[in-house]
Image (tube, helix red, strand yellow):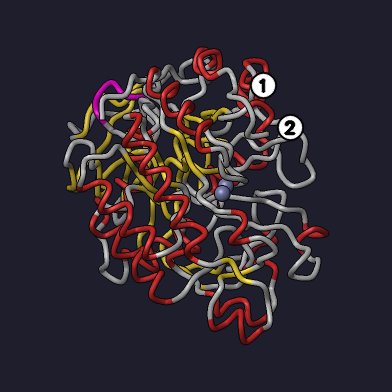
Amino acid sequence: MSAARVTPPVASQPAHRGTLVIRGGRVVDPSQGIDRVDDVLVRDGRIVAIGGRGEPADETLDAAGLVVAPGLFDMHVHLREPGREEDETIETGTRAALAGGFTSVACIPNTEPPIDTQAAVEFIHQKAARADTCNVFVVGCVSRNREGKELAEIGRLVEAGAVAFSDDGAPVYDAELMRRAFEYCRMFDRPILAHEEVLELSRGGVMHEGLVSLTLGLAGMPAAAEEVMIGRDVALAETTGGRLHVMHVSTAGGVDLIRTAKARGIRVTAEACPHHFTLTDESLRGFDANAKMSPPLRTAADVEGIIAGIVDGTIDCIATDHAPHAPEKKMLELDRAPFGILGLETAVGLTVTRLVATGRIGWPRMIESMSTLPARILGVDRGTLRPGAVADITVIDPNLSWRVDAASFRSKSVNTPFDGWSLQGRAVATIVGGRVKYRLGGR
Ligand SMILES: [Zn+2]
Ligand SMILES: [Zn+2]
């Protein structure tokens, strides 16, 4: 992928002065094919070198027994601001990101109003700079006001710094509009992040359509609702030469469609969410609204298909679809509660526990899927520890066992199905631009 590299949106912040040495960690940097125990030297907010000469530093972080990786990057986060500050704000959402080990997030534009103007993009950049937490890259709307009728001003949004385009929360329904969106985005080499759903097939549904929905007497959303739309968008990406990024793939059939499209050379990438490779529709048996999301939790065979897709690289990235909803909304009965769950503060633990500790993937593949590839897909100059790069670094304790406690989350919301779960693996330090922005145990 040869996307134009983007100027960091928070460049207005002064560079952090001084030296930092992260000593003796297992340095995993897939962008350079590095996986070895070594030191990482940082000066004035940039990576200087991997490989220590025992130099003295202003600040030293002992990383013996820890994984030292390029900063994790979540390319699918709903920060809710502007418009739904009761659920999350840019400040609380980015604090949750830091606590989860993320140095960068891409925020999805289904805010109120949606991010479909230059002024709206600038608003996010300013708020993010003021929060002074992690990097926030902005995704702009495909269609004006997310109405799916006319294209947003894609060129002007790119000028303002939008790194990709999406009407997520909903699919881009009009195939002709989607075709033109691909053509426009192609001129700027920007991907379209697509929520794939045929609404006629999923209407009224609260969970996956299958045996469990039948048993519970709940309306279902069939796998075909997602797969038909993936098929349409793959065809449109092929016709136009545009770049399709399939968000939150949840079905084994969807993974197969993407695998075939990639084999044919179509420009398609994809992400999967930790909940889709961890839970199945069995979780709905308790009628818990924290198991309600779109696309829904599917079957054990789908979970296996997604994991196979992550293992073989069909699924490029792990992204969270962090979707905060204030408690009073999520406590409604299942058919009235909104779709979506939190993701930022449990993603590392779930990924290590489900995929790394079980031997399904190694650390290099995990870091590639959570740092290197999201940055590359968005054409952003992150996800690497190359000398000269901005020193965004995540330090992970691969063996730390911990209990999820939603009440202690940095996020403003608590809607997670994983509260009380025991997980392995957690970020213990999150470093943005050479500054330690989060240490586990230190508030
Ligand atoms: Zn979505
Ligand atoms: Zn989403």
Q: How many marks?
A: 2
- Residue beneath label 1, please? 120
Give the image location of residue 305, x and y in percent: 34, 67
Contact (Cβ within 8 Å) of mark 1 with mark 2: yes
Q: Toward the viewer: 440 or 372?
A: 372
Looking at the image, which residue is at 79% across and 66% down?
Answer: 331
**Is 61 rendered above or below residue 422?**
above
Distance (Cα) linking label 1 and label 2: 9 Å
Most foreground residue, 160 or 65: 160
- Secondary structure type for disc 2: loop
Q: Secondary structure at mark 1?
A: helix
Q: Does residue 19 appear anywhere in the picture? A: no
The residue at the point 60 percent across, 29 percent down is: 143
Determine crowd level at label 1: few under 14, some 14-19, many 20+ residues with C-alpha closer than 10 A.
many
Magenta stretch in the rendered image: 386-390
Coordinates of residue 44 in the picture (x, y in percent):
39, 19
Q: Amino acid at mark 1?
A: Ala
Looking at the image, can residue 152 be seen?
A: yes
**Classed neighbour count for the residue bearing mark 2: other residues with Cα under 10 Å, few (<14), some (14–19), many (≥20):** some
